[in-house]
Image: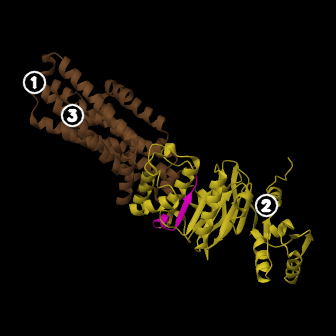
Chain colours: A brown, B yellow
Amino acid sequence: MIGQIRSEFLKIRSTRTTIGLVVGLIVLVLLFVLLTGLLSHGKELASSDDQLNFLGIGSFASLFAALAGILVVTGEYRFGTIRPTFVFTPRRWVVVTAKYAASLLAGMVFALLGQGLTLAIGLGILSGRGIHRSLSWGSLVQLGLGTVAAAALWGGIGVGVGAVVRNHIGAVIGVLVWVFVVENLLFGFVPSVGRFTPGRAQDALTGMSTDHLLPAAAGGVVLLAWSLGLLAAGLVATRSRDVD
Amino acid sequence: MAVAIAESLTKRYGSLTAVDGLSFALDAGTVTGFLGPNGAGKTTTLRMLLGLARPTSGRALVFDRPYAELERPALRVGAVLEATDFHPGRSGRNHLRTLAHATGVPDSRVDEVLKLVELDNAKNRRVKGYSLGMRQRLGLAAALLGDPELLVLDEPANGLDPEGVRWLRDFLRSFAAGGRTVLVSSHVLAEVAQTVDRVLIINRGRLVVESTLGQLTARVGGSVRVRSPQAHALREALAREGVDATETEGVLFVRGTTSKRVGEVAAASGVVLHELVTDASSLEEVFLELTADREIQ
């Protein structure tokens, strides 16, 4: 299993896909942090809720972690490397689980980068503009650690979805539609259900102050359940299907 | 000892039967040609052998076990199914390293196999820039990482230039010379006739012929051509072995045996040979006849 995880990690590192995702994440985070931080009126960054939203921009890392997780699996089907992969490791659950583990780690790295940059630049902007930091250290720590944990779990979600869907375009579009449309609609119209979606669970875990969210710990448990549930679905889907 | 066995192996996709009750055994130390026209079920059979596809019924065993139950199978079995199974953006060396990590083979072995397939100059380039021949060799390098006893190759000569085909033939010969086993599929008999000892010919998912190449040649009824300044002496020597030959202006046409046997007889009787050829075109005719669709619909 250790060897397979090393293998999967090398697969992630050895193509430009990952670099592309990291660059995309950094660009997006810089763009939003700088635009929000520099163009917003001082009053709009004053309350602790405002600052939480501002400094939570790094939560984008989760989406990128999910995309990376998807591509870790679907890339193998797309380019046919799944054949040598399964010929070398015919116990497919080992492959899928190793991809899951490697994607957890990749998700953490994404979050450390994205959230780290956001916090460093965001706090710098606040202090540079002389805006009082109204967010407690405790909230900042919860935001940082929560984002790292969430992005890790989203990396795993990506692997599960990728293993079920197999097609990279279908999986990526599916996750984007889910995150940007379905979750928002569900949470907007039926918050008692919508708060159990992985995105809102992450909001709860990272301490966002939106109404109707679950308690932080419950959010963490729900997100973990999504991640492990999709891993299980991916394991079942991979075990039973032929590889062309 | 059988290295790999198929027992009534069957694969159905809906109403289509791709492989139909196929049984065969691969003996250690042999090179077997797995032949049949496109769509005969060769690739499906190989996938079932390697645990990539599940048989509808019957079973395939490799070293007495279903492939998926082998511990670190790459140390015993090497396989190349498609020449295109690479991420175009990954270097050849990194492709091999991902597989080496997965099966616990050191990076030094990666560089060794790269040298073996003559790719060490291109190893750090991305596969995107490789020619088809280079990709075939990279696939072969991956198969060789674990120094396997059994090599399974699906249409390895596809898309190779004549030089590549020759390189592959020489390589397979030297691989098998060490007592190891090869199963190589092709839809062109001539491509593998000079390499294989045995042939399995399938058509429409069923076994049509399982024989040694010699038996198949014999079945053709006369396909070894020999040119010799001592043709007459050779003919007599062959006759003593019970092999008939006809002589025309220093050229013998020998029926019912193999070029290997004729060469041995010639050597034993001190006869000089100028040419010794298995007539591939007539072999090809037999192959086409065996795999022709004789059902009139």
* Residues at marks 1 and 2, CA–CA distance in whole angstroms: 84 Å
Q: Is B77 part of what is drawn in magenta?
A: yes
> Residue, x 18% and y 22% (percent of image)?
A37
Mark 3 secondary-structure assignment: helix
Tell me which segment is drawn in magenta.
B71-82
Q: Is A124 positioned to the left or the right of A237 in the image?
A: left
Q: Are marks 3 and 2 in contact (CB under 8 Å)?
A: no
Mark sitting earlier along the chain (3/1) = 3
Identify which amino acid the numbered label 3 is placed on: Leu
Percent x, y for residue A188? 32, 24
Q: Are marks 1 and 2 in contact (CB under 8 Å)?
A: no
| Residue mark closest to the camera, 3 vs 2 | 2
Q: Nearer the viewer, residue A188 or A74?
A: A74
Which residue is under mark 2? B280
Percent x, y for residue B254? 86, 71
Which residue is under mark 1? A128
